[in-house]
Amino acid sequence: MRPVLVVPEDLVSHLGSHVAFGGEPPSYLVASSAQRARLARRKIRATVGDPEHAPSYRRLLAKGRGALVVAAPAARLARVVAAIRAGVPDAAVLVVAEERLRGAGIVTVSPAAFADRVLQPELERACARARAERLRTHFYDAERVLILMQDDPDPDAIASALALRTLLGRNRTGAPICTFGTITRPENLAMCKILEIDVEPITTKEMHAFDRVAMVDVQPSFLEERFVNVDLVIDHHPIEEPVRADIRDVRPSYGATSTILVEYLRAADVKISQRLATALLYGIKADTLGLERGGTKADLEAFTYLYLLANHNALRRIERPELSETALDALAAGLAKRRIVKGVFFSHLGRVATVDLIPQFADFGLQAEGVEWSVVSGEVSGDLHVSVRNVGYVKSAGDVTRAAFGDLGSAGGHRTMAKAVMPLRDLLEAGGETRSATGCQERIIERFLRALGQNGKAH
């Protein structure tokens, strides 16, 4: 059965042939020859008739396969709908009207809602396109552009950097993707290898060789290095200090920076290759745990768009990297040392070869029965790294982690995930302990529970 769209007369000329059903152009029923003539000049077929004449609908709906659009004065909409119901009782009817019209199979959309669903997305797209053009103009005459990420970049940062380079129309030589640190987590290394993404180490001295500096998924205040000038910051993390950059786009409500870059690419009509779509999809999945953690409508829309473009075989290979014997031993030791206290999973891994094992095990700890928080720590080169995860409907992980460890080192993060890094010696000395794994875990438990609002030592 063909659907029927009933709209006020003044809206008809704006619809044209854009209302389609089954790929077929619509037919129009209008009340005057003048309206039909105006539509005919645009090669749109229309029939002149009385929209309150019930038998005519059976004849009109029998022709063609597209939607039937009925133009009617606002004062007559109710009678028009009644005629449609009488003529074709089983037709699906959509009415654009201020007041809701009742009846089986009738859906009413107000003009305001019509504008919100049709015009608002286009307005947002126009704003995104303007931002993209401003960004491209700023970098247009730069010979070399530095795209900088955090010290140990995650999938969201890597994908965002690749997307920004694509948006700017640059290659590896003209816009290298760099970090002050190195990539450590196995899945992130696999991502770069499988998708052929080159991430280069850089020092502050080497930055002077670039004409422009762009930062993605990170802000200047998050890094130990200090910068004279940053041209662009695109990020989704909460702002801790004022962001000093010529162009700033920081959206803490978004689940991933990759989502912001997808909006830029789509608004600028930049083709997203399968390789880039795979990277961006993985970036969103990694930062939102498959849209289960901190995902928004924007993240969902970007995820849905990328899903059909991505290489899912490559994605599976990235998400399941091989674990070495050393990694398995560290995780086994972490399970043996686990403590679950008041709904919090604690484990101290001791010395670990790479820092990536700590957040991996923190994600795993959240799966324990009855657990709402997971706090996993480990020692790397004399520093204590603490990864914190929660189920999403409790206190902010970033706030609690900052309250627990902020006085000893860097600490913070999102609502559902956070981390802290501090000298191990400082943690033990603050608690009056000698150097020991047991003392370290006890200090972490005590500090974290206190920050969580559950005062008192663990039992």
Image (cartoon, rainbow, N blue to C red):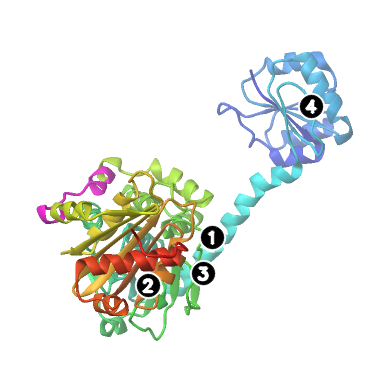
Q: Nearer the viewer, mark 2 or mark 3?
A: 2
Q: Is residue 391 above or below residue 75?
A: below
Residue indicated by mark 1: 129
Magenta span: chief secondary structure:
helix
Q: How far across and down, in percent of the image, does residue 203 sit?
A: 25, 80
Q: Position of residue 290 (x, y in %)?
A: 39, 46
- Name the amino acid type tagged 1: Arg
Q: Is residue 320 one of those drawn in magenta?
A: yes
Estimate the spatial distance between the alpha carbons at disc 4 and disc 1, rounded to whole Å: 41 Å
The amino acid at mark 3 is Arg
In space, the residues marked 1 and 3 are separated at their CA atoms by: 9 Å
Residue underneath mark 3: 134
Q: Nearer the viewer, mark 2 or mark 1?
A: 2
Q: In 3D space, how far apart are the residues under numbered discs 2 and 4 (Cα atoms)?
A: 60 Å
SS for callout 1: helix
Could you say whether the residue bearing mark 4 is in a helix, strand or loop?
Answer: loop
Say if mark 2 contacts mark 1, CB within 8 Å.
no
- 78 is higher (above) or lower (below) than 354: above
